[in-house]
Amino acid sequence: MPRTVDLLTPMPRKIRVGIIYGGRSGEHLVSVASAASLVQSLDGAKYDLVPIGISREGRWLVAAEPAQFLESGISMKSLPATESSAQAAGGTALPVPTSGKNVILADVVGDSIDVAIPLVHGTYGEDGTLQGLLEMAGVPYVGAGVLASAVGMDKIVMKKLLTSSGLPVADWLGWRRAEVETEASMRQAVEAVSSRLGFPVFVKPANGGSSVGMTKVKDPEKLPSAIQAALAYDTRVIVEKGIVCREIECSVIGNAQPEVSVPGEITYTSEFYDYETKYTPGKMQLVAPAPLDAETTRLVRQMAADAYRALECEGMARLDLFIEKPSGKILVNEINTIPGFTSTSVFAKLWEATGVPYGALLDKLIGLALDRYRERRDLAGLK
């Protein structure tokens, strides 16, 4: 059982925070950027940092010196195992362990950290797999639990749960790979999209994030190739109706009683909010607070909280919503349970606009993680 601490009592020592980053998904570098920002921002007077890297191949490694953990501008294909191999990779030194051995989570990490901050975006990190591993190891962790993480990653299941909870979403259709693998079945899919959704549509892997594998399709002839492109990332594909809208985002933190930030509005000049637009400086603008009237602001924040609860989320999330033009109807697009976590990411900027600076936000999230762990420990009768 890992050593745990109580933020409300005098501390005999600093809290040891494991920052888990990297991972096997297409969002590896996004995760590295999130981890770098967090390492630079956590209060060294309160926390000892234990960076834990996961290479693109899935190898777990513990960095030796947190102070030199990450540097800006790193383009990392994988985390090497030794200091010499890092230098051989060329250019900037990479975060590497001195031992070069894999981490056995329960035996090594569980005994050396008080709380983990999972910053592995996408599959094998944001989808409940990493959260389940931390649960088994008895390690408190920041963010959503296993169920909400899995649901938040699966756009098809997510939309079903939102709809069943009475929350509006854009119209959509979805298929498994086996259901569209023949020419005849693909033709039927195209006909279904044409008749039920119309064009344009957005085609996405059912599981994934950061718009990886996503295509905007304006005519039926391009739909089969877009579906195949999405199926390169997952075994299921979702096709969503394209709507003319304002794109609004809210950051949410909390366990049983979520708090919602002021809404922010995303604007951009590209065709749609794709990976390049999200992560290229200057291509996306965030206006926070969003220029909305008081009633619309209230409704947006309420819908974000309702969606957070409907998906059984805890810890933190970013809710993406649409305001349809010209009707003004508010729709839930999706939830992101491990949003980009740099100090300039939308999640943090929205809290900053709400009056919660980045350092205080990190303190709140760690406190929520320890609160949830203590509650579940007490229910299980553990000490």
Image (spheres, grey):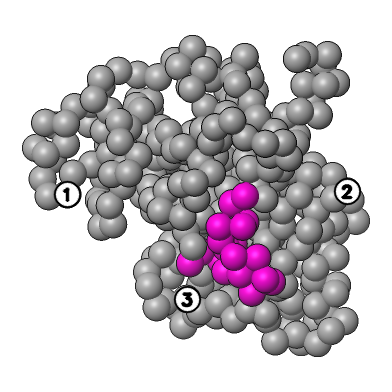
Q: Which residue is mark 1?
A: 92
Amino acid carrying label 2: it is Ser
Which of the marked residues, 2 or 3, is nearer the chain's N terminus? 2
Amino acid carrying label 1: it is Thr
Helix, strand or loop under label 3: strand
Q: Which residue is mark 2?
A: 164
Look at the picture and state if 173 lies above or below 63: below
Quadrant position of the N terminus in the picture: top right
The residue sitting at 78% across, 44% down in the picture is 255
Q: Which residue is mark 3?
A: 284
Amino acid carrying label 3: it is Met
Judged by depth in the image, the label closer to the viewer, 3 or 1, is 1
Q: Is residue 99 left or right of residue 199?
A: left
**Disc number for residue 100:** none
Judged by depth in the image, the label closer to the viewer, 1 or 2, is 1
Q: Is residue 194 left or right of residue 56?
A: right
Helix, strand or loop under label 2: helix
- Residue positioned most to the right: 166
Marks 1 and 2, Cα distance to the nearest angstrom? Answer: 50 Å
Q: Position of residue 58 (x, y in %)?
A: 38, 27
Q: Which residues are magenta?
A: 344-363
Which of the marked residues, 3 or 1, is nearer the chain's N terminus? 1
Q: Is residue 353 highlighted in magenta?
A: yes
- Pointer 2 local density, CA inside 10 Å: few below 14, some 14–19, many at least 20: few
Q: Is residue 148 highlighted in magenta?
A: no
Main secondary structure type of the part rendered in magenta = helix
| Foreground residue among 357 and 344 | 357
